[in-house]
Amino acid sequence: MTSAAVATDMSLGGRAHRVAAIAAEFADRVDVEGRFPHEAVDAMKAERLLGIQVPFAHGGEGATMIEIAEVCSILGQACAASAMVFAMHQIKLCSLVEHGGESAWHVDFMRELAGRQLLIASATTEGGIGGNLRNSICAIEIDGDTCRLEKDATVISYGAHADAIMITSRAHKDAAPSDQVMTVFRKGQYTLQKTVDWDTLGMRGTCSDGFLFKGEAPAVQMFPKPFAEIAAQSMLASSHLLWSAVWYGIAADAVARAQSFVRAAARKANGQTPPGALRLAEASNLLQLLKSNLLSGLKAYADAKVDPDRLSSMGFAIAMNNVKLASSEMILTIINQAMMICGIMGYKNGTPYSLGRHLRDAHSAQLMISNDRILGNTSTMLLVQKPDTSLIG
Amino acid sequence: MAVSDERSKTLGDFMMNQTIRELLGRLGGLPVAVTELEDSADLYAAGLSSFASVQLMLGIEEAFDIEFPDNLLNRKSFASIAAIEETVSMILKAREVA
């Protein structure tokens, strides 16, 4: 294909692949330096990927969750940190699109986001809540038309690089910890004072530093719905599905590297099957399971999306939890298999078969909302949820 | 409707309301007293956690000898004392018809 033909491929996949090529080029540097993937995010903006989920009516492309997951997977095969930044932005955007449609301010913001390719970060964690984002200590203060918030946000991924932050708090100073709201604060309406450095094993480019957040904005920027509904109806599903799509991308690239390793060995082996070939067959089997699991989750979301009651039902929450649990655990097994196949060439950095970054990035998956917390949550729901034993339902 | 029917229905409603309130007080883990809550008060805003809501569901299933079908296991069914009453009544009524 000529470069002119590549340049004219304006399909979502074509645009994502161009961004992925740039993300791949800088992936090792982003990882080593633990810095924000500027080049990849600039490319996402240039290819206008940040606003794809915004409905057509508000200047976007109305991309579905499946289409967004595909972009996450394409980017995940190149640079997991860039892909995760994209995924986290789209998760925030999902809440904005699903729950902001009846508020004039939020609709205007969506339109501007699509037009100017704004990047949204999330501030749901807080010092002292023990990792449970459904509780807040800080409370928003409403003073006439203005709202003010101060939050000890122990993690705001790419907070220093975002154009807006969607942040949770108690709904007012007397509200219970679980009575929360979410508010959009735009750059210029808040200050961030860094409190914790993001120096981690993997996912080093997400720059998920901790900050003391202080913001003041018009009160109309608060979402009109309780955060509990937003969390149940848009965040739970979009997080587990889009994270899993990024993780699938990491594992798929690891298997692709292992496969090229085995193929190269087979060419030199004079008719002998190389020792890694059987393990590759196993890895390919697991990768297919991972993919099927994610695709069935995406289908369940598409089916449930038309019915808010179903979206917030226990059966659906359990299904989404299971997608996350399975994909976050299985990628480690798969990448480990790939490492066994590639041997020292996989263990070393800087070879075409290097898998160190993949393995380190993948280790974040079980911890982004701890799998133990999710298992606990599912086990509670299973006490009352009635089993659905149908195959296709 | 005959007066006696009306009265017995009201008494049944009252008892259901009291049972739900008693279970909510015991299992709901709320920071406020149940007596301070209106029937229509948002229980999640009052501090009902998702874990406590499951304990409450189990307690109600036991007390009324019912099982919540999956389509009623959502936030809306347990959003207030009134919503719980309505959900329980719906299940009891469906059982009478069956």
Image: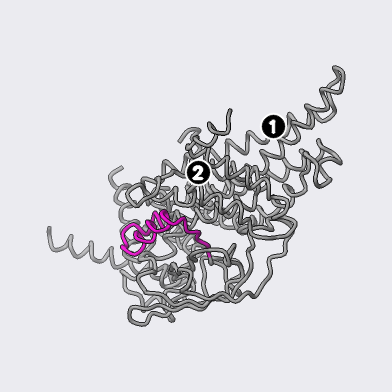
Tell which subunit mark 1 falls on.
A
Q: Residue at x 70, y 52 (%)?
A: A361
Lower position in the chain sequence, tag 2 or tag 1 = 1
The quarter in which the N terminus of chain A is drawn is top right
Q: Nearer the viewer, residue A379 or B18?
A: A379
Left or right relative to B42: residue A35: right
Q: Is residue A142 above or below residue A222?
A: below
Q: Residue at x 53, y 67 (%)?
A: A123
Tell which subunit mark 2 falls on.
A
Which region of the structure is painted magenta? A96-122
Q: Marks 2/1: CA distance?
A: 31 Å
Q: Find residue A126 and name its label.
A: none
Q: Nearer the viewer, residue A169 or A144?
A: A144
Q: Find residue A284 and name its label.
A: 1
Disc 1 marks which amino acid? Ser
Color scheme of the displayed model: one colour
